[in-house]
Image: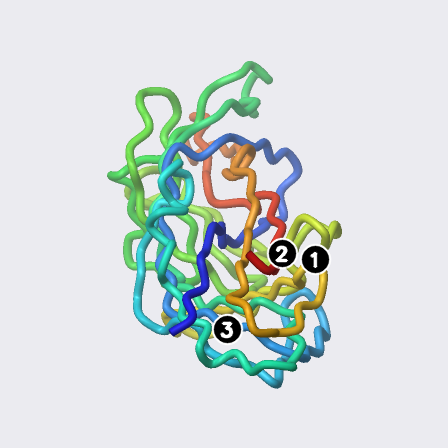
Amino acid sequence: MRILYLIFFIIFSIQVSHAAATYANADRYDVTITKIQVCENATISSESSFSVSGCVTLGSNELTVDIASTGVGASLGKYADTTAMLQGRTYKYFVPTLSRSFTIKGGGSFTKISDSSSATCNTDEDASIASNSRHLTISAGKVGGTATAMTGYVPSATSSGVMCRNQDCSDSTGSRTFSQDIPNDTSLYGNAISVPADSTSTMSMIYTFTSPYTVGDSVPVINMQFGTSSALEIWPFRDDEGVDTCSINAYFPKFKVTVINP
């Protein structure tokens, strides 16, 4: 059995139409992988639409890892089996399927709307989305205090999203535009992300190998390099009483994937 050794970082970003986003490092970032494929061909129609062919599945069991941890490589070391990769075939794309729920912890500075002074927005375990749809809502962060791990969900692209402005989401702002807007540097970020419009629990992404890989006799090694700085995105708000609040969610890290012979 050929084993594909993995050192990788898979993540997503949701951009919200807002004028003054700032970025912060994530101290914790738990992602659940449900499947990994490598593919020969792909048609990438847009940053939110793609199709693939000539694919083989390298792993299909559920695995949750903290991708901000230095031990992530060991956790992923034997996730994927390369037995299905056919000799003589050339693979160009890496396609992971991920859960749309995740856990993040961290915080960073933002500029308050009320007086333009600086404050800290932290993730908050007590944040709620109330009765709103979890795939159309982003919960509030916590101004000041200490960051605690919070569960979030990747929202669907929409022009009617909800941004919570306090911890229980009794105050929120609607008609927000959520989009999967990937940075344009495809050498360091993914090519596209496909997030369902409904409440389907998984999503998929596509990355291009730095060089196409033709399978030979030796066991291939996929080396994935990543950087997690600025992996949280923060937006300032004011609630209905004029108090400065904030929202915090995930943002893309830098990422590069290469296939080599050991």
Considering the image in quadrants, where does the N terminus appear? bottom left
| Residue at the spot 40% in from the left edge and 71% down from the top edge | 81
User: In the rendered structure, which amino acid carries the disc numbered 3?
Assistant: Gln
The C terminus, quarter of image: bottom right
Q: Helix or strand or loop: what does disc 3 sit on?
A: strand
Direction front: furthest residue: 217
Q: Mark 1 points at which residue?
A: 210
Residue 254: numbered disc: none
Q: Can residue 65 be seen in this view?
A: yes
How many neighbours does mark 2 have within 10 angstroms: few (below 14), some (14-19), or many (20 or more)? some
Q: Which of marks 1 and 2 is nearer the N terminus?
A: 1
Which residue is painted at 52% across and 78% down in the image?
85
Check disc 1 and report its element: helix, strand or loop. strand
* Circles 1, 2 touching at the beta carbon (< 8 Å): yes
Residue, far left? 126
Residue sitting at x 61%, y 58%: 260
Circle nearer the N terminus (1, 3): 3
What residue is drawn where x is 41% and y is 63%?
Answer: 135
Name the N-terminal-most of marks 3 and 2: 3
- Whether label 3 touches label 2, CB < 8 Å: no
